[in-house]
Structure formats: C-alpha cells, structure tokens
Amino acid sequence: MRAVRYIWAGTALIAAMSATAFQNDKNNSAYRYRWRDASGQSYFSDSLTSDALKVGYDVVNSQGMVVRHVDRQLTTDERAAAKKVADQQAAAKAVADQQARDDAQTLNAYPTEEAYTAARQSQVDNFHQAVNTTQLNLQGQEKTLADLLNRAGDLERAKQPVPPYLTERIGEQRNTVAGLRATLQRQQAAEASAKAGMAADIQHYRQLKAARANGG
C-alpha cells in the first residue's frame, strides 16, 4: 500500500512539474508590444491598443529584444500619396525595362556602328522621299484648285451663275489641298526630328556597345 502511495505521489509531482514547465515555456515564447506616445512616454502591453496602431509599435520577445517594428497606420491622404508614388515608380520601371529591351534589340539587329548608321540614314532618306512625294502631289492639287477657281471666276465675270456642281467641286478640292498641306507639315517635322536625333542616337548606340563590351 505504501508503495502505491509513493507511485501516486511521484506521478502527481511529475505532472505538476510538467505543467509548470509548459507554463514557463509559454510565457518565455510570448511577445509583448511596446510603443511611445506623442510625449515620448513608453508603454508595454500584451495586446495592441488603438494608440499603438496610430503611432507604430515594436514587437518585443520575452528577453526584451525587439524582433519587429510596425510603422504607424497611414491616413487616407498618406495612403493615396503612397499609392501615387508607387504607381509613378512602377511606371518609371516599366519605361526603363522597355528601353532596356529596345536597346538589346538594337544591338542584336545592328552588330556594327556602320550598320546602325546606315539604317538611321535610310530612315532619314525615307522621310525626305515622303516629303518630296507630298510636295509634288500638293503642287498638282493646287493647280487643279486654281483651274476650278478660274472657271468660276470666268463665269462670274461673264455675269453667268456658277453651277452647283462646280461650287461643290471647288469645296472638295480645297479640302484636298488643306489635307495635303497638313500632311506635308507633319512629314517635314518628322524629317527634321529624324535628322536632329540621328547624332544623339548614334552616340547612344556607341554607349550601348561600350557597356556590352565591358560586360554591362
């Protein structure tokens, strides 16, 4: 009987020690939260409060060491501003990534500066040819308009009415001439831009070649 009591007592002691050890482990693994208010006063708590969320807080382990810092909650305006900055950064990165792809494609397509320069000059020549073609077309359309206007002028000087079809034809021809003049202006601007940018493009090509040669 005495042996049985000893066994039961030993079992109870082991259970109590296990429970104590479990509780100690639980307490040792627990985290607490620390934050400071606007006046600099420090606070510790086992749970987060609205004040802690507003000002930001540290997560502290049982040894009193900070394991993580959480910034304060952003206001609506601050979140909007942060999103705007993030969107701008993402857009800038997208542009930079696209430029990198374009540069790589340029180097692959034109292995030498001579080949690249010839290609750029060909683009300028194409713009110039388009300008010449439009100028010739415009001259012909302007002559046609002048002929129509002369016919209408002759009728008016002869005290005769200008037929509706001729009036309509003059309106259509004026629109054609106006459209060609606008096209010519765009083409001339494109040619000028291509000429002006050619030197800068060749310099950029040289920089890309140098960067690739240096392992960039």
Image (cartoon, rainbow, N blue to C red):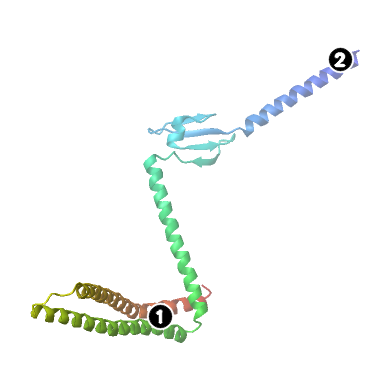
Q: Are marks 2 and 1 in contact (CB under 8 Å)?
A: no
CA–CA distance in space, label 2 to label 1: 98 Å
| Local secondary structure at mark 2 | helix
Location of residue 69 with respect to 183 vertically, above or below: above
| Local secondary structure at mark 1 | helix
Who is closer to the viewer here, 134 or 61? 134
Label disc, if present, on residue 5 of the rendered structure: 2
Q: Which amino acid does label 1 sit on?
A: Ile
**Percent from the top left, x then y, of residue 185?**
27, 76
**Percent from the top left, x then y, of residue 112?**
49, 84
> Foreground mark, 2 or 1?
1
**Residue highlighted by disc 1:** 202
Q: Which residue is drawn at 74% across and 22% down?
A: 16
Q: What residue type is labelled 2?
A: Arg
Location of residue 1 with respect to 141 vertically, above or below: above
Residue at the far top in the pictured view: 1
Who is closer to the viewer here, 26 or 178? 178
Q: Which residue is drawn at 67% across and 31% down?
A: 25
* Circle count: 2
Q: In this view, does 113 lie to the left or right of 155?
A: right
**Which class describes the residues within 10 Å of circle 1: few (<14), some (14-19), or many (20+)?**
some
Upstream in the sequence, badge 2 or badge 1?
2
Who is closer to the viewer here, 159 or 9? 159
Q: Which residue is drawn at 74% across and 24% down?
A: 17
Who is closer to the viewer here, 215 or 205? 205
Picture quadrant where residue 189 is located: bottom left
**Percent from the top left, x then y, of residue 179?**
27, 73
Picture quadrant where residue 39 is located: top left
